[in-house]
Image (spheres, helix red, strand yellow):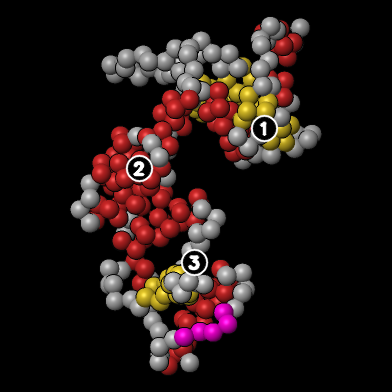
Amino acid sequence: MDASENENQAHEGVEDVAVDVPGFGSLKIADVRDLTFETVEEAEKFYFAYSAAVGFGCRRDDKDESKGRIRWRQWVNYNDTSGNRIRLGCTPRKQTRVNCAARFRINYNDTSGVYVVKKFDPEHNHELATGNQIAFVRAHRHVGTESLALTNIMTRVSIRPCHTYEYMVEQAGGYSAVGFTIKDLYNKLDQQRRTSPFESDSEGALSFMRGLAAKDPHFICRFTTDPENSTYKTNAYNQPLVLFVGTNNHRGSIVFGAALISDETVETYTWLLHIFLELMNGKMPKAVLTDSDEAMR
């Protein structure tokens, strides 16, 4: 009897209930074992989505890498203790894991050139999170770039991170919808101070806008810098502000876009107008009203 037969016997009698996994549809245990993945990242994305749908946290476990390719990778339940290492001379921490056997392993298949599911244990020896509890499972909490950038901006105008967090809770519609806790935010801020702090207000603003663009397909931002004079990294706010403003059927003003530019030359305005047309899907305005700037004539 080989290893695969042992695995099949181990799962006999397990209730095969379909699970709705975001991005992968409704899957049963047999469906999961038949999945293939182009990359390790794709497999990790699946198992994290699966664990969130079921109600538990997961983490990376062992892997084997050869000649620049990961030959196999395994993920386990966050409560698994099999990979714990004891450091000599250190006081052991209080054990909070329950040695859950749930795990997910993929192997690279040289013939097909894809990763196949080698092992999938769906059983747990602990209670699973349900409903709003899932958002507070450690493995599924993440402080996004846009949230970190917003906190940095608010801090510079004397608004404390705890108050910024409460603002994000209100915007998201509740604590479970934010995606992280106040402790996670403070930990992220501490990590930022120790590693790569933002160099300026404008760099933080750019990170904030990138985060908004990633979440909202209707929000688009473009920027460019001069390698010899990176004005987006300075604290000089003497930059011209250009607003693209139109009117609606009720003669109300509508802001289509805004831009901070480094100068008011023909080249800069040409670039800006091309970007504006790109964002408007090539639809040109019927009339344009400007001031008497020579570069706009």
With respect to residue 61, does 95 lie above or below? above
Which residue position is annotated with label 1?
25
Q: Give the residue at the far right of this rendering.
A: 111
Q: Amino acid at mark 1?
A: Gly
Does residue 213 appear left or right of residue 174 in this picture?
right
| Stretch in magenta | 285-289
Going from the N terminus, do you reach mark 2 or mark 1 first?
1
Q: Amino acid at mark 3?
A: Arg
Helix, strand or loop for disc 1 = strand
* Mark 1 Cα shell of 10 Å, populated few (<14), some (14-19), many (≥20): few
On whether residue 99 falls in the magenta region, the answer is no
Point out residue 8 in the picture as x, y percentages from the top left corner. 72, 11
Res. 54 image quadrant: top right
| Disc 2 to disc 1, C-alpha distance | 31 Å
Q: Give the residue at the far left of this rendering.
A: 158
Point out residue 216 in the picture as x, y percentages from the top left corner. 51, 53
Q: Amino acid at mark 2?
A: Glu
